[in-house]
Image (spheres, rainbow, N blue to C red):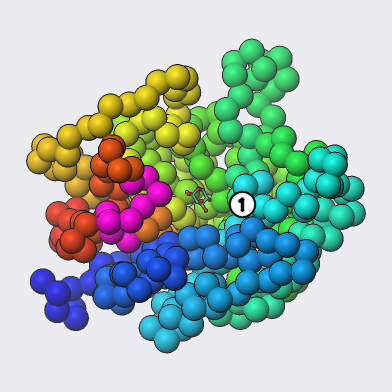
Amino acid sequence: MHSDTFSLSQTYEKYFLIGAAISPYGLERNTALLKQHFSSVTCENHMKYSMVHPQRDVWKWDGADQIVAFAKENHKQIRLHAPVWHEQLPEWVVRDTDGFLQSRDHVLACIEEYIYNIGTRYGKDAYAWDVVNEAAADRIDDYNREKFGNIPYRNSDFFQACGIDYIAKAFHWAHKYAPNVQLILNDFNECDPYKRERICRLAQELLHRDVPLHGIGMQGHYNMDNPSFDELRRSIEAFAALGLRLQITEMDLDIYHNCELDLMPVINHVEQPIELTEELRARHNARYAALFGIFREYADVIDSVTTWGVADDWSWLQHPVMKNCPMLFSEAHEPKDCVLQMIREA
Ligand code: GLA
């Protein structure tokens, strides 16, 4: 099975890149799988603001440098990830020491400085960049939606300080400092019909303002029920209809529902551990393979499919009690049945 020619990414060359999000530790642990089955890498955390520039006078490049060096040595393509995100962001970017919102000028200057540093350091080596992450409002209840409309903007500190300009300017700066990179607006719950509409409205607004936006990142944090195949197709078609390229940027397949990314709000509800039976594993494999089947159908608009991790021994969805199996490769780093099926059907 592990001959040089048995490779997910080589088999999928004719469709799209196959990517993985990794940390420096993940790189060490998964070197063999990354070399054999993946053609693209994303820094899981090591290009985020709070990791690289946690304090005004501190810049930490080691982790990102290591991952980029691995990618270049091994001819993997590089995605840059999430300089502008309301999470994993140092407080001083958006709040002063008394907790008050910083000025628009301060916030925009921080965004430009950060994008300049990432763009000039890695832009020439990268093909894609999730420039702005999760800028669309997530859940809006029926009452508010009916009263105020399906307003697309997340009411983050960025938005409060700068309005939509923080998004527009971030893309302009990314284009200025990394002119050859495909620039992506990345978001989650992208197959929920109302969220899909909000992402489309936000993207349309940016395009209307001549913002250099090239693609939509569909994070792809899915579970065993959501999204339905129909809603997935509708989202792919709706985003592609804007004239944009698509990337699946953070895919995993959760066997639980009680995570913040679920489409249904779950309040005060803790799920019980689910036994990973053969039957459940078979359904999980079948769903992964079916989802990749849909991605293949839309390969003319999809440029890459990245999973948020490599193998089940590490994932942000793993929990010591509630064991999960979200990745394409097992804890023992063996390809799961879905990988064999995805290769067979390609
Ligand atoms: C979001 C972010 C990612 C990662 C995941 C899971 O989707 O975009 O960078 O942090 O959450 O942890």
Q: Quadrant of residue 24?
A: bottom left
183 or 159, nearer to the observer: 159
Magenta: main secondary structure? loop
Which quadrant holds residue 41?
bottom left
Q: Viewer-proximal residue, 78 or 243? A: 78
Check mark 1 vs ligand 1: CB closer than 8 Å? yes or no: yes
**Residue name at image x 73 percent, y 44 percent:** 205
Which span of residues is magenta-colored? 310-318
> Position of 268 compared to 99: left or right?
left
223 to 49, vertically: above or below = above
Identified by mark 1, the residue type is Gln
Near mark 1 (Cα within 10 A), the count class, few <14, some 14-19 or many ≥20, is: some
From this viewpoint, is residue 180 visible?
A: no
- The quadrant in which the C terminus is found is bottom left
The quarter of the image holding the N terminus is: bottom left
Q: Quick check: 307 left or right of 4? A: right
Query: Does 201 lie within the magenta span?
Result: no
Identified at 82% across, 53% down, the residue is 107
- What percent of the width, then of the height, locates residue 180? 63, 75
Whether 192 is drawn above or below 282: the answer is above
Q: Secondary structure at mark 1?
A: loop
Where residue 196 sits: x, y (%)?
54, 36
In this view of the protein, can residue 309 be seen by the observer?
yes
Quadrant in the rendering for residue 344: bottom left
Name the residue furthest bottom: 73
Mark 1, residue position: 88
Q: Is residue 317 magenta?
A: yes
How many numbered marks are there?
1
Q: Residue 112 at what x, y percent from top left?
A: 78, 64
